[in-house]
Amino acid sequence: MDSEDRPITPSHGLPETHSSPEEDKSVLQIWGKSSLKGHVTISGAKNSALVVMAGALLCPQDCRLRNVPSLADVSRMGEILASLGVKLTRQGDVLDINASYIGQSTAPYELVSQLRASFFVIGPVLARLGVARVPLPGGCAIGARPVDLHVRGLQAMGADVHIEHGTVNAYVRGPSRRLKGAKIYLDYPSVGATETLMMAATLADGETILENAAQEPEVIDLANFCRAMGAKIQGAGTKTIVISGVPSLHSADYAIIPDRVEAATFLVAGAITQSEISLSPVIPDHLTAAIAKLRAIGALITPESPNCLRIAPGHGLTATDIETLPYPGFPTDMQAQFMALLTVSEGDSIVTETVFENRLRHVAELNRMGADIRVKGNHAVIRGVPTLSGAPVVATDLRASAALVVAALAAEGKTTIQGLHHLDRGYENLDTKLQKLGVKLQRLQGDSTTEVETAPLTPIAPN
Ligand code: UD1
């Protein structure tokens, strides 16, 4: 067994998850203004990988997942599955999962509290065992993020659900301990609730109809993975998903889609530095809203091939308004990066965040770099400035940290970013990828001036 071919367990897991955010004293120094050139390879989608890993709990046979990004969040989800008794082995971007034996129906609080997506295991564990106990994930940096839609949906499928001492206890009565198909209307098209209920419904008795379901590409990816295991699911990617429960699922070999948020972040990096770069693999349809906004701002984006996009400078950068919405609307996970771009786009822009209640915390840090942004409620008014200036800044959540990186590329002088555990939750090899595009950067450990290896660190704020 070589160093990459090893089971993911709390004792033998990937090293990046074993330092705490409190210990995260490393900083990323970026020197602007950068000019980017070349090609960047986009990794597998974090949010797909996390939920597909949870989906593997539905299957009593081996599952092989490909294109799994090496990220702190993925390692954390691996640890949660391992804590339930599941066997995982990783080699490069291939992750083998065997959930033939689930010895535990209780997910540990220490792990769930650090990764909101781990709450989604409640659906498959309940469907497999008829009982599941998962701690409430708690709040995080971008808002309260309740799980009421997950809970109400499972109750509609016949589960008894009680929240006691901060843990959601769910069980199914009756000799078969099988959930029952139901018609469920989601008050809001929550991605996580759609995924939890879709997974639960795959093994339920009868048909489940999810109305007002989330239409995100990651929901479709999960549905495709479940179908590869023999699930009967129709309508994923539309507002109505119909799942006909089957008694059991079988092994599957499945490749995760490319990460649309990482791709959008690199497109913004190209736009803000007025550079020409290409990206692949991407699924351009997943980037429709981002591409439309980049074109409105002034970038030229052309398809080089069906899975490769090129961005080039257009007529300068012009202000535009953005409102985040559930897919196919503009994604909240791209809001911060686009705000960084708008800080140097001529004119006034308004960015409105409607999905999460507290997701404008990057504003203060961008203003430290010379941006002119005012916040009122969930609106940010951005007055474009000619240039940003490098400064010491602190990342407040995952996508906010990406916004600071993007801003640093366009800023005069040196930007020093703290809070890298956020960044490392969602961007695989970001430092290396930027360096290959010609960016001058350096990661420093604590007060040292020694360049350190750019391995992901511990996650905290889940999204
Ligand atoms: C997922 C993504 C995250 C993305 C978000 C919205 C993963 C791992 N994370 O998060 O990156 O930003 O979708 O695209 O896939 N809500 C409720 N009750 C619930 C569930 C959600 O009120 O039971 C609210 C949330 O508080 C939030 C909104 O619905 O305000 C959207 O949340 P949701 O779509 O569920 O996001 P996540 O699945 O947590």
Image (tube, grey):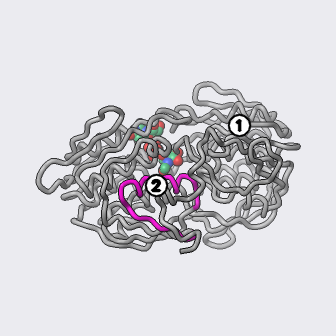
Q: Position of residue 30 (x, y in %)?
A: 81, 48
Is residue 91 found inside the magenta-colored segment of the image? Answer: yes
Mark 1 — residue?
A: 394
> What element does badge 2 sit on?
helix
- Which residue is most to the top? 376
Q: Of helix, strand and loop, which one carries label 1? A: strand
- Give, as a single range, the part of the protein colored magenta: 70-92
Q: Residue 125: x, y in percent?
A: 31, 54
Q: Residue at x 85, y 48 (%)?
A: 32
Whether residue 65 is situated above or below residue 208 in the rendered picture = below
Task: Establish if 171 lies above or below 48.
Answer: above
Task: Indicate left or right for 397 with 273 as reference.
Answer: left
Q: Nearer the viewer, mark 2 or mark 1?
A: 2
Residue 213, image x, y percentages: 38, 49
Residue carrying label 2: 79
Front-lying residue, 251 or 386:
251
Name the residue at 65% across, 31% down. Answer: 380
Picture quadrant where residue 46 is located: bottom right
Packing grade of label 2 (10 A; few <14, some 14-19, many >=20) is many
